[in-house]
Image: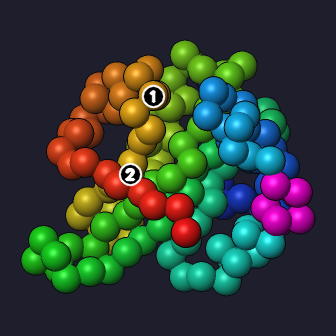
């Protein structure tokens, strides 16, 4: 399967939201009106270094992720990329798209001058954890979140 990755457009947002909602956690938390998601996409577009990327197969959006480039002082002023909202459509899992997605994210991060690619993942996503381990990531930190 030849999936190609590109910057998302506003027209892709409903497909991305559908993928975000199509799992055990997303079903309960992705309930905003589409206008909210479109406004968030517009805000992302206005920010430097905040990208929504989609993967498509034969014109159909089948994967997505958000990549945010962060400059900072820690780790000897290491520039890092934060990856969020990693999804592959249920109908396309097990076909190597996840590996291609992570390779695309890594290539974009390197091109932006990043020396570290990081993300958080929900503790309940056991299958995803095995995938990330196989992809060469290390579960080196404990993540905390606090709703505001």
Q: Nearer the viewer, residue 2 or 131?
A: 131
Which residue in the structure is indicated by mark 2? 119
Q: Classify mark 2: residues with Cα within 10 Å, few (<14), some (14-19) or many (20+).
A: some
Identified at 16% across, 76% down, the residue is 74
| Precedes in sequence: disc 2 or disc 1 | 2
Identified at 37% across, 75% down, the residue is 70
Q: Position of residue 40 (x, y in %)?
A: 73, 69
Residue 33 magenta: yes
Q: Is residue 8 left or right of residue 60?
A: left
Q: Position of residue 24 (x, y in %)?
A: 63, 27
Identified at 50% across, 31% down, the residue is 98
Q: Which residue is farthest top?
A: 94
| Figure disc tally | 2
Location of residue 43 by image quarter: bottom right
Above/below status of 125 relative to 105: above
Mark 2 → mark 1, Cα distance in angstroms? 15 Å
Identified at 45% across, 28% down, the residue is 124
Q: Is residue 134 left or right of residue 44?
A: left
Q: Position of residue 78 (x, y in %)?
A: 20, 73
Which residue in the structure is indicated by mark 1? 124
Q: Classify mark 1: residues with Cα within 10 Å, few (<14), some (14-19) or many (20+).
A: few
Where is the N terminus found, in terms of image quarters?
top right
Above/below status of 13 relative to 73: above
- Does any portion of residue 108 appear in the rendered image? no
Location of residue 139 by image quarter: top left
Above/below status of 92 relative to 42: above
Element at label 2? loop
Q: Nearer the viewer, residue 125 or 132?
A: 125
């Amino acid at each position: 399967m030849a999936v190609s990755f590109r910057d998302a457009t506003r027209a892709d947002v409903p497909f991305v939201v559908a993928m975000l909602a199509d799992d055990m956690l997303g079903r309960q938390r992705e309930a905003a009106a589409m206008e909210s998601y479109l406004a968030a996409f517009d805000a992302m577009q206005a920010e430097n270094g905040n990208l929504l990327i989609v993967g498509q197969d034969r014109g159909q959006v089948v994967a997505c992720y958000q990549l945010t480039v962060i400059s900072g002082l820690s780790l000897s002023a290491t520039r890092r990329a934060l990856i969020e909202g990693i999804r592959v459509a249920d109908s396309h899992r097990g076909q190597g798209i996840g590996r291609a997605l992570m390779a695309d994210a890594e290539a974009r991060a390197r091109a932006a001058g990043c020396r570290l690619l990081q993300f958080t993942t929900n503790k309940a996503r056991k299958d995803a954890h095995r995938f990330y381990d196989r992809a060469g990531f290390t579960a080196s930190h404990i993540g905390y979140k606090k709703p505001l």
